[in-house]
Amino acid sequence: QVQLVESGGGLVQPGGSLRLSCAASRSIFSIYIMNWYRQAPGKERELVATITSGGTTDYVGSVKGRFAISADNTKNTVYLQMHSLEPEDTAVYYCNARHTVFRTLTYWGQGTQVTVSS
């Protein structure tokens, strides 16, 4: 079992920055792909960013150049650094871990609210 705990959400003005954190209950990054998803009101959950055990990253087009995902293995923590935030980025952001081999083995955090508004 793995627990994921997100933090760092909040209210920010357009153009501002936030850094989200996702702390895992144990060391998993070597065998799990780590993802950040988001879900805005009335919309489906969307994959925002991914980082593999080898450090390869990928992003949905709408956040490329503005968001950066990273992992600190010593702290069992994944980060999502968000810059140039837009009202369209408003959503609940969820951390997700998916096993690299057993793809149905997946864990979710409880989510953290990000609101971009003036």
Image (tube, rainbow, N blue to C red):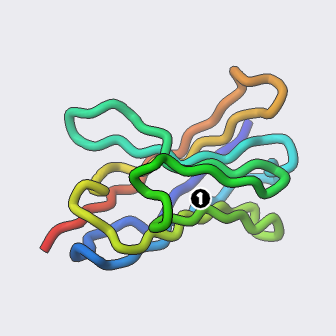
Q: How many marks?
A: 1
User: Taking 101 as reference, is 19 left or right?
Assistant: left
Q: Position of residue 8 (x, y in %)?
A: 45, 69
Q: Position of residue 24 (x, y in %)?
A: 69, 54
Q: Which residue is disc 1 drawn over?
A: 22
Q: Residue at x 49, y 40 (%)?
A: 47
Classify residue 43 by image quadrant.
top left
Quadrant of the image containing the C terminus: bottom left
User: Taking 100 as reference, is 14 left or right?
Assistant: left
Q: Position of residue 69 (x, y in %)?
A: 61, 62
Q: Amino acid at mark 1?
A: Cys
Judging from the image, what secondary structure is the residue with disc 1 in? Answer: strand
Front-most of residues 92 and 87: 87
Q: Is residue 69 above or below residue 25?
A: below
Q: Position of residue 73 (x, y in %)?
A: 81, 64
Quadrant of the image containing the N terminus: top right
Front-most of residues 35 and 2: 35
Q: Residue at x 79, y 53 (%)?
A: 26
User: Taking 18 as reference, is 75 left or right?
Assistant: right
Mark 1 Cα-neighbour bin, 10 Å: few <14, some 14–19, many ≥20? many
Q: Residue at x 69, y 51 (%)?
A: 51
Q: Residue at x 84, y 53 (%)?
A: 54
Classify residue 16 by image quadrant.
bottom left
Front-most of residues 15 and 97: 15
Q: Is residue 101 above or below residue 96?
A: above
